[in-house]
Amino acid sequence: MTHPIAVNPMGRPRQGGFTMVELAIVLVIAGIILVAALKGTDMINKAKIERTVQDIRGIQTMVFEHEKRTGRLAGDCTGDGLIGVTATDLQVVRLAGAAYDDNADPTAGTGPACVNTSTAETNLNTPWKDLRKANIIDPARVNRQITKNQTNNFYGVGSWQVNSVPTNVITVYDIPLWMAKGIDVAVDGAGVAGAAPETSGATGRVRLLHDGTTSSPNGANWPTANANDDQLVSIFFQFDRLAP
């Protein structure tokens, strides 16, 4: 049995498809969804920046808490005020996070906690094991767990000469450029009055350490040539009370 073709009042077959009103409604809905998605992404990105700043401040607080309890900074076995993990040692974190060990005993394995002033303090594990030994960080959590940052890379703690001044630093490895800039603004502010927000990774407490190809322990300007905001960079935060 065949069905008759639907006709409109003018006697012509009714055509399928959307009317202009229907298309307009679809476009409005799609626009609302897109705006919501972009706002959601922006909120997630801001949360990552805020969490990383909290992590950095938290690490700084724990290192100073160790000083209150023991008379020296975590990882400063000699008590000279500088954490002995140097720029060269810290680069190992960026290139191979596996340098953090999984030894549950903070006084054993690679880079043990400071036992005395003769303990080698150049190993990047030492500051974290010091914190675990002092129960400032849960001793049951191994270094590879407690040092993870928001991009699943790592934090590091150490020191080097920043503009020829010995400075203790916290490093954050392989984060997107947009996150690095956001952290810089959150910590160092918006720069000089009347200028654009803080745009240099060569000034302030937060500085560019590694742009993916070269390292600069003094800090460097944010990448501009052929740069995109998703490229990975590494930064450092100077937490010394006398940092330049």
Image: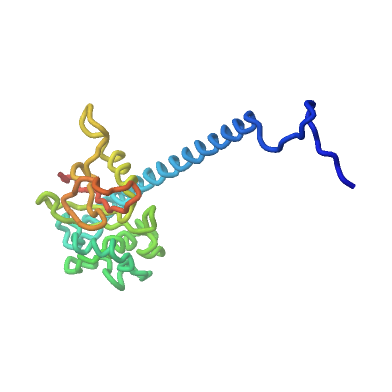
Q: Nearer the viewer, residue 18 or 231?
A: 18
Residue 81: x and y in percent read 16, 54
Q: Single out the residue that lies furthest toward the right.
A: 1
- The residue drawn where x is 16% and y is 56% is 160
Q: State whether residue 63 appears in this view.
A: no
Horizontally, residue 8 falls left or right of residue 187, namely: right
When the figure is inspected, residue 67 is found, relative to residue 191, above or below; the finding is: below
Q: Quadrant of residue 161?
A: bottom left
Horizontally, residue 124 falls left or right of residue 20, namely: left
Residue 134: x and y in percent read 32, 60
Q: Nearer the viewer, residue 142 or 37?
A: 37
Location of the C terminus by quadrant is: top left
- The residue drawn where x is 30% and y is 73% is 109
Q: State whether residue 66 appears in this view.
A: yes
Residue 127: x and y in percent read 27, 60
When the figure is inspected, residue 17 is found, relative to residue 74, above or below; the finding is: above
Residue 220: x and y in percent read 19, 48
Horizontally, residue 108 falls left or right of residue 158, namely: right
